[in-house]
Image (spheres, grey):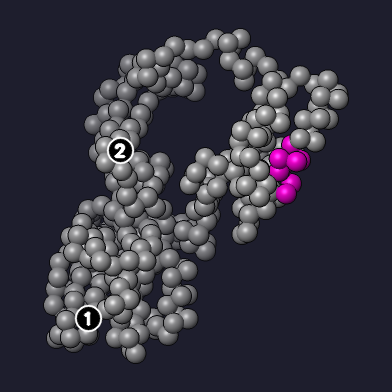
Amino acid sequence: NAVLVSSNDHFSVSTQLNQAISSSAVATFMNSSARNDSLFCISAECYAANGGYGNRQYQGAAAATSNEQQDTIALTLWYSLMHHDNYVAATGTQPPDPSYNISFANGYIYRRNDAQQSRYAVDLYYNEDRKDHATVATTELKQMLRDEGYTFVATQGYIDYVGAAPAQVDSDWRLGISGQVLSVPPGFEHETVLVVGAGIHDVVLNEWSSRLLSKYHTRRVQGDDDVVTAYLGYWTDNGAYYYGDACGATTDPLNLTCCSLDVFKQVKAKLDEQRIPIRYWQMDDWWYIGDRPDAYLPPNASVWAGVKGVQHWQPPSDFYPGGLAALSAALQ
């Protein structure tokens, strides 16, 4: 992350804020069908040494470093050549038999749950027939292991349910790419701007917006020059009559019958009939193909699940034949 903490009168807080900014380490479950072996990776060494393991599934955000204030505990990765079994457990835990040797340190997790009881428990399971130890965190994988004959051994600690999405947790600010993103392309850059000030007018209109204008070498658009502020528009945001999330955009399988191309053609025809001069059409975050992060939340999480991630800037063809181009043409 490139983090800029800025305000005309508040440069003195930059050191304090930078000390509070933390990155999360990604925890991933993976396995090898050839070895009949499961693995729970956090450290870079673990990922580098096990590139052949597939079926990788995001488990959560582990602690970035050892931290007494956050009460973290180290994980150790053991391996048994005799059993072809990786064994991931809290440092100090003894493996099942002497055939297991320490491979390397495997990152840090939290010793306790948080005050909201919203973290995942990192649990160790074992399958006697497969001679396989599996360390997992998400509810779905725990259920899958139980269905496949694994038995619970012990809880090793806890990890957060998401990665470094912008959020304030206790005294930490977590900024950057979500931990659910396991890789980014070469040359990828991500920047975060934190602006400190008094009041939304000062912070947003003067400080934050001015820095964005400066960075992208653009100018502030006047109200009459912007189609959104100068003309009437039709919105499909939360609370609108035609809002995909309220009627099927989050179901499996996806169902956008309520807000399809045919429906919006009818809406447009009625608006024209009533001589309502709509100049633009706002499509909210429900129309494109993508997954919501609900599956990554622990059962008792009391937070908003978030907007679904974009896989492609394309609507499902079943409901929008011809894609965005056909929708745009129909609404002219």
Q: Position of residue 166 (x, y in %)?
A: 40, 41
**Identity of the residue drawn at 32% across and 76% down:** 33
Image quadrant where residue 14 sits: top left
**Identity of the residue drawn at 65% across and 35% down:** 326
* Residue 261, placed above or below residue 71: above
The answer to whether residue 207 is visible is no
Furthest residue in direction right, as rendered? 273
- Inter-mark Cα distance, 2 to 1: 37 Å
Q: Where is residue 238 in the image (x, y as percent from the top left)?
A: 65, 39
Mark 1: amino acid: His
**Dominant secondary structure of the magenta stretch?**
helix
Image: magenta residue range:
257-264
Q: Position of residue 253 (x, y in %)?
A: 63, 59
Mark 2: amino acid: Phe
Furthest residue in direction bottom, as rendered? 129
Q: Quadrant of the N terminus?
A: top left
**Identity of the residue drawn at 25% across and 66% down:** 52
Judging depth in this view, the residue of 12 and 318 nearest the camera is 318
Furthest residue in direction front, as rendered? 322
Residue 205 within the magenta-colored segment of the rendering: no
Helix, strand or loop at label 1? It is loop
* Residue 289, placed above or below residue 106: above
Q: In this view, does 98 lie to the left or right of 267?
A: left
For label 2, the residue is 188
Image quadrant where residue 230 sits: top right
* Residue 173, placed above or below residue 111: above
Q: Do the residues labelled 2 and 1 touch (CB within 8 Å)?
A: no
Helix, strand or loop at label 2? It is loop
For label 1, the residue is 84
Q: In this view, does 101 lie to the left or right of 165?
A: left
